Amino acid sequence: MAKKQLIMEKALELFAKQGFEATSVQQITDHCGISKGAFYLSFKSKDELIVALIDHFMRQFTTDIDLVVSEEGDEDLLYNFYYTTFQSFNKHSDFAKLLMKEPTQSFNEELFSKLHHYNKSLEKVILSMIERLYGERSNDLKYDLLFCIKGFMSTYSELFMIYKLPIDMESLVRSLVEKTNLLAKNMTISFISNELIQVIDQPLNEEPSLEKIIEIVEKNIEDIEDSIEKESLLLLRQELSEPTLHPAIVKGLLANIQNHPHCKWTAYLLRGHFVMK
Amino acid sequence: MAKKQLIMEKALELFAKQGFEATSVQQITDHCGISKGAFYLSFKSKDELIVALIDHFMRQFTTDIDLVVSEEGDEDLLYNFYYTTFQSFNKHSDFAKLLMKEPTQSFNEELFSKLHHYNKSLEKVILSMIERLYGERSNDLKYDLLFCIKGFMSTYSELFMIYKLPIDMESLVRSLVEKTNLLAKNMTISFISNELIQVIDQPLNEEPSLEKIIEIVEKNIEDIEDSIEKESLLLLRQELSEPTLHPAIVKGLLANIQNHPHCKWTAYLLRGHFVMK
DNA sequence: TTGACAATTGACCGGCTAGTCATTAGTATA
DNA sequence: TATACTAATGACTAGCCGGTCAATTGTCAA
């Protein structure tokens, strides 16, 4: 299992430098100091490696940002959002580079739709933030705001992603907060309508099914040692099959697990599930 | 020569779908209905093909936008800028896709710096527009505005580039004009300073030399048939070596050539040269 | 019709690729 | 130490890559 992580880390370094296609399995194994055969003990194919990378890091991004956005209080929400996002980009800059870099469609259809799905998850989180921050007013403008925020993020992150400049993150974020608020409070012409978004989302709008969530939770339970988190997961597992607990209790249980490093993604999924209902 | 264009067109289609690395010369020649050997009669290597593509289309983009920005009157300048840019993206969507797609560094150093150079040309054009539109006020904010505009362009162009949606370009542009004006007129916190930009630009700040410009002009003169444009080019060629003409005359000569399909890039270079002085 | 020349072909080359598997090294138990 | 097991190796395969070039085909003036 540790071998798997080693390969993922070292491969990511090479992918960020050269791209996915241009990096050979031989290069990866050389860089790891292992044999080519050993690679195929951990991953069935080179494609499976990239799938694992995307799953791992996109879950990290989504949960990092979701944690900030789902916190109480709107005070510094926008500031914290940008700050966390950029920190997360910075922390996993190799992966972020790979994401920016890789052809949107040179991947398999499977990989493309996977990325698309995570992207939509992220957009959903950002949209919920916009709704909280700007309330009613945002109804017609929220998708335009979403696009503007995404534009800011991608353009400004170039500064530290490509040029590797030492950035004063706090003033960068302060300037983006001002820009975002300006747009949100003064914009009158929206371009992206609900309908347009629905057309875009149409082909791949798969919510994870209840069965899928249960499966993930149970795997999670097996993976972690005895602790409050494990107890909470067991109770939540029960609640998935037979809902009996008070919403406040469920919320508490979610709070119990959402800071455990191996439960973040599960917490995110569960929050989506229980809030839905 | 026609063969060269055929290859460029067909190759671009494949590159847009699969990416540069993932497309083989064999695929390209099959798609053209020619033999592999014939490819190497037109291009010395696969790399030379991508260089030709980048040169061809980036010149197109730059001149298209520069023509709009260098027109008199600030009335609909911003509107026309966005409109032309998106039309140009749309017209050459395969190439635009390739640009978005391709790893920033999977190219050679040569290709990377080539792209970087064209990118800076485009930024220069946009900056001159910002200065004209917002005057003094833009001094401290211009680079932030540039980044915001670039962010809008890349995020919103996804709508028709990736999703291939039929877009009401006029309302899209109107909404972006409002956003840009809002930011330009109300922003107070700038993040990107002159110094920061200088650091970014440092490694590759090559202006084309006078000799280089003369070379390009002479090649252009050979390429086109007798016409007012050719006469104008010959006079401008003379003016490059021995400046004698009144600036107004030079400006008129430039106006003569800037709408000829094969002189646009030369006109752009010359305008930069004569305005410099 | 012939012959000189240019355009075009596709078999071929060396090198690299993803992936396999018989063999070997390492380790834990009895 | 002997045994049984797993972990790890790297030579190997089949196939694709960019690029070359001797051989073929097409063209046109004499």
Image (cartoon, coloured by chain):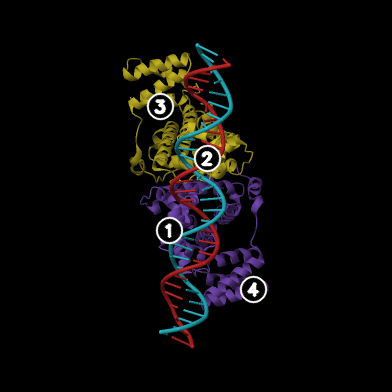
Chain colours: A yellow, B purple, C cyan, D red
**Subunit of mark 3?**
A
The mark closer to the camera, 3 or 2, is 2
Relative to A209, is B51 above or below? Answer: below
Q: Are marks 2 and 4 in contact (CB under 8 Å)?
A: no
Name the mark on residue A269.
3
Relative to B239, is B130 above or below? Answer: above
Badge 2 crowding class, 10 Å Cα cut-off, few under 14, some 14 to 19, many 20 or more, is: some
- Residue A75 appears at what percent x and percent y? 51, 28
**Subunit of mark 2?**
A
Badge 3 element: helix
Distance of label 4 from label 1 (alpha carbons): 35 Å
| Callout 1 amino acid | Lys
Asked which quadrant contains residue C25, the reply is top right
Badge 2 element: helix
**Subunit of mark 1?**
B
Residue position for label 2: A25
The mark closer to the camera, 2 or 4, is 2
Badge 4 element: helix
- Side of B234 relative to B1 (left or right): right
Taking the spot 53% from the left edge, 71% from the top edge, the residue there is: B257
Residue position for label 1: B91
Relative to A269, is B224 above or below? Answer: below
Badge 4 crowding class, 10 Å Cα cut-off, few under 14, some 14 to 19, many 20 or more, is: some
